[in-house]
Amino acid sequence: MEFILVTEQHEPHVALIQLNRPKELNALNLQLMLELRDALAQLDRNPAVKVIIITGNAQAFAAGADIKQMSDKSAIDMLTIDQFTTWDQIRKTKKPIIAAVSGFALGGGCELAMTCDMIIASETAKFGQPEIKIGVMPGAGGTQRLTKAIGKAKAMELVLTGRFISADEALSYKLINKVVPVEMYLFEAFTLAKEIAQMSPIAIQLAKEAVNRSFETHLDEGLQFERKNFYLTFASQDQKEGMQAFIEKRKPNYLGK
Ligand code: CAA
């Protein structure tokens, strides 16, 4: 594993996965996502593990999908790369996953946190779907999960402005479970994980499945719709301009084509 660190028994029955591309603020490149998928599948098969925690570092949970890896892609490239199959496999993890978030959880980073089952945040955490600022839109469930979690009006505002919200705002919108001081977020995630880990693994799995069933009815259809529109943005010059402007650290000049 090059981009993640896995500790199978960080605490009895609790595994820890740390996203580990600190210089790129844990931007989620394709290989990182494949490693994450494989690690989760392995932990799912390990009977000694009952709960999984995914974290980043104090500065960033993850600042989104890797813009540098995507910037020159066409819509057909994106369709062919089919990165979201990996996300679908992650979503099928049977054991509960807690996201322990500090710093940036943006774009794909926010989507990854929302793909987890619960979110514990440090008071420095910032959540957002800023894809609109680089000429695209969320592609890994943001338009679907955020809307289901916080309601249409706020989700629309966040997706269309790309603005970030604080951990306290995210808590008030019921996007996350708890906010704690930055020194405590991982400890707090472990406290929650250890409480869950005392329960029957069979009951845990079936209960997770049942809660998700209520949340995920129609999710598949929504995700497919979002995905196709996300790919379509790569047919525009504005996507090229938006991502190039990010890489060159300048303001984008959108032409609407
Ligand atoms: N992809 C690739 N590289 C990224 C990145 C990303 N998503 N986010 C940050 N980085 C890189 C920066 O390019 C920079 O690298 P260099 O030092 O080589 O220039 C490094 O990480 C540090 O970033 P900044 O210098 O920009 O740090 P900052 O503190 O000034 O700003 C930030 C932090 C506000 C998070 C800013 O980096 C930012 O806006 N990042 C992009 C956020 C974003 O747009 N995410 C959505 C991506 S698209 C997506 O996720 C699609 C989807 O739904 C699947």
Image (cartoon, helix red, strand yellow):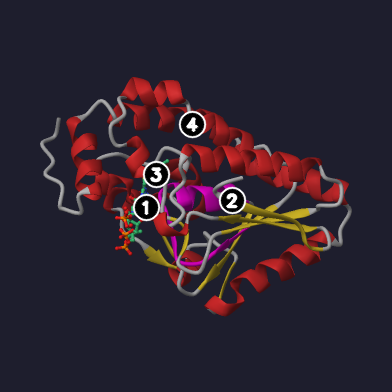
Q: Is mark 3 within 8 Å of ligand 1?
A: yes
| Of the image marks 3 and 4, the number of the one nearer the N terminus | 3
Q: CA distance from mark 1 to mark 4?
A: 29 Å
Q: Position of residue 110 (x, y in %)?
A: 47, 53
Instruction: Report whether residue 232 is seen.
Output: yes
Q: Nearer the viewer, mark 3 or mark 4?
A: 3
Which mark's residue is nearer the viewer, 1 or 4?
Answer: 4
Q: Which label's residue is closer to the chain start, 2 or 4? A: 2
Based on the picture, tell me whether residue 230 belongs to the magenta stretch.
Answer: no
Q: Earlier in the sequence, mark 2 or mark 3?
A: 2
Q: Which residues are magenta?
A: 99-116
Residue indicated by mark 2: 4
Up-down relation of residue 1 to residue 126 (above or below): above
Mark 2 residue's CB less than 8 Å from ligand 1: no
Front-most of residues 151 and 221: 221
The amino acid on which the numbered mark 1 sits, given as a three-letter code, is: Ala
Q: Earlier in the sequence, mark 1 or mark 4?
A: 4
CA separation in Å, label 1 and label 3: 28 Å
Residue receiving disc 1: 153
Determine whether the beta carbon of the residue marked 4 sits less than 8 angstroms from the nearest atom of ligand 1.
yes
Q: Is residue 242 above or below residue 24?
A: above
Q: CA distance from mark 3 to mark 4?
A: 12 Å
User: Is disc 2 in contact with disc 3, using a CB cutoff of under 8 Å?
Assistant: no
Q: Crowding at label 3, few (<14), some or many (≥20) Cα neighbours within 10 Å?
A: some
Q: Look at label 3 and name its amino acid.
A: Asp
Q: Amino acid at mark 2?
A: Ile
User: What SS does tag 3 mark?
Assistant: loop
Distance from disc 2 to disc 4, alpha carbons, whole Å, reads 18 Å
Q: Which residue is mark 3?
A: 66
Mark 1 residue element: helix
Q: Nearer the viewer, residue 253 or 15?
A: 15
Residue depicted at x 51% and y 52%: 149
